[in-house]
Image (spheres, rainbow, N blue to C red):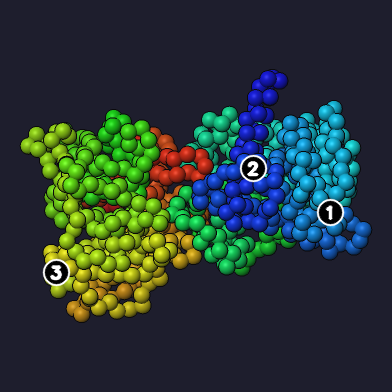
Amino acid sequence: MGPRGRERRAGAVQSTNDSSALSKRSLAAHGYVRDAFAALLVPGPVRRTPLVHRGYYVRARAVRHCVRAFLQRTGALPAPTRAQILSLGAGSDSLYFRLKAAGLLARAAVWEVDFPDVSRRKAERIRETPELCSLTGPFQIGDSASALCFESSDYRILGADLRELPRLGEALDGAGLDATSPTLLLAEAVLTYLEPPGAAALIAWAAQRFPDALFVIYEQMKPRDAFGQVMLQHFERLRSPLHGLELFPDVEAQVRRFLGAGWTACSALDLNEFYRRHLPADERRRVETLEPFDEFEEWHLKCAHYFILAASRGDTLSETLVFPSSETPFRIDPASPSGFFPARVVTSDHQHSSLKRYGHTSVLLSPGVIFSAGGFGEQEGRHCRVSTFHLLSRTCDSEWKGSQISTLGTEGQWDGRLYHTMTRLSDTRVLVLGGRLSPLSPASGALQLDLHRGEDNCPESQHVTVTKAALEEGPMLSCWRHSTTEVYHQNQRYLFVYGGRSAVGPVLSDCRFLHAETMAWVRIPVEGAAPEGRHSHSACSWQGGALIAGGLGASEEPLSSVLFLRPKSSGFLWESIDIQPPITPRYSHTAHVFNGKLLLVGGVWIHSSSVPGVTVINLTTGLSSEYQLDTTSVPWPLMSHNHSSVLLPEEPQILLTGGGGNCFSFGTYFNPHTVALDLSSLSTGQ
């Protein structure tokens, strides 16, 4: 890369620092962390989304955890040992000021390195801000020819290029960094912006230079799955591509990377594991209630694609001090796959007739007719709650064709709700229960949707009428991410409404029965131990009862339980199904019963580094097996969460409709096609 290319690259990386600094400022302003200095270092108010706040919060806590562990260890060493923190690519971070204000630098000092322009700008900002100067004490500002931009007794800011290691070493020597003292090297999302040879050289250089050191990095990983692809494309668009992820795609590869470069011990974990293992439950509860939030899938996926790593050298420091081992393993990996379900695109819809949305619901109205409503998606060139309906119809030549349908007239309008349920009442009528407009605004009441199709079945002659369903109001109509399942009691058809969440209840355990003919809520006795509350679970009918699988529990942790609401003469009975081998906890999946087997399709899990495919559970024996999706014939990426699905048992196939999500700060992604999973390998005899 030539000089101009390097300058453009540096400028793009610096712009990511500016964006990150604003996010950290917003994080502090909204109470996630205590940081009075972020606003002093980064001018201008900004408000990030709750999802971005959570992502930056867990990043801040992971780094804080490592820094505190280092200072606690070095603080216990005999005097006059002086610890050093070397922050690489520090940008506008306020670490020094937070540590100084907390009284944690009595026997430690901080060095920061970033591009010269970034470092000089920060030095000037400090010089102009009395509140910051009062913490640094007397200081000097370096001249434009010097790498040392700012110097006080315990704080130095250097302008240097991390790709030029000889100059970096000289600058650090000149700034008083003692290579023999216990040193914490900190690199937050830094190495990934270096070309692989440059990053490798920096890791090896640090190992050779500092005999008693702890190297902590926070970076991205898992580039090959759907979320990882969206993440990579985002940074490509910013002209700051992520390097080295293909070479080091997971925590195991990252650990080998550091051990192979001269570090004597190393451990790493993704941010889901850090959040669950190293943050107290009361702190998690505090953060989870700071803002209205309903983007759990993307929160967990973001955490699955970032890791925190601690590598050590020397006798003073050990990575086990940072991440002590636990007797209870966090990982719950699925069994080795028993096979594959081929996936293929079944529609080649034009842009105006595609089903690009998530949080919607699809239902099979009649053979060859699938109706979808609601969700967040693309409409008229913008992202919004979708106000049109979608019809997927099978043509005479057995091809599927999609079309958008609007409501007729203005009397009853569709409100574009998300995370509702939809139950078929007839070939042309569905019942919609629950849903939300925003995390604070539940959708208003139950709705009845009627599909009207002209004799020619052309899209122009089709429309939907929306009317309020004539049933009594109740708490179950103010929830979302719940389930509605057809069950039978005394030869009567009921809709079993279970779980979900609401504006006042983050997790619900309520269950109610709606008589399908009279539309009246009915009390039916339910025996057995009631399951813990959950939302984003799956539910499907079986033998007159309901199978409930997975979901997200009260602590925002995925569940693995599979429950059967068994019908009996007096009502229903909750039973737990014993599954072997145990399945990986998950949520945001769909489920169907096919040939006596429960199929759990897609979803999100946090206890495994793999991506959910289809889990098959034999309902007679309780034996489970895993199947991966063969997506070689499907445009990539394909996200298998926030989707809906329809079982076509005669094919046999499952159609996946929609799916995707708001992928942290990387942009929103919608699956562009309806995809069919071929179930023919699941023969009756298996």
Give the label, 1 or 2, closer to the camera.
2
Who comes first in sequence, dot 1 or dot 3? 1
In the figure, 381 relative to 55: above or below?
A: above
Give the label, 2 or 3, closer to the camera.
2
In the figure, 344 relative to 554: above or below?
A: above
Q: CA distance from mark 1 to mark 3?
A: 74 Å
Q: Secondary structure at mark 2?
A: helix
In the figure, 379 relative to 253: above or below?
A: above
| Tag 3 residue | 492
Which quarter of the image is occupied by the N terminus? Answer: top right
Q: Position of residue 81 (x, y in %)?
A: 89, 57
Q: Quadrant of residue 177?
A: top right
For image coordinates 66% across by 47% down, the residue present is 39
Asked whether 560 or 532 is in front, the reply is 532
For image coordinates 61% across by 62% down, the residue present is 279
Who comes first in sequence, dot 2 or dot 3? 2
| Tag 2 residue | 21
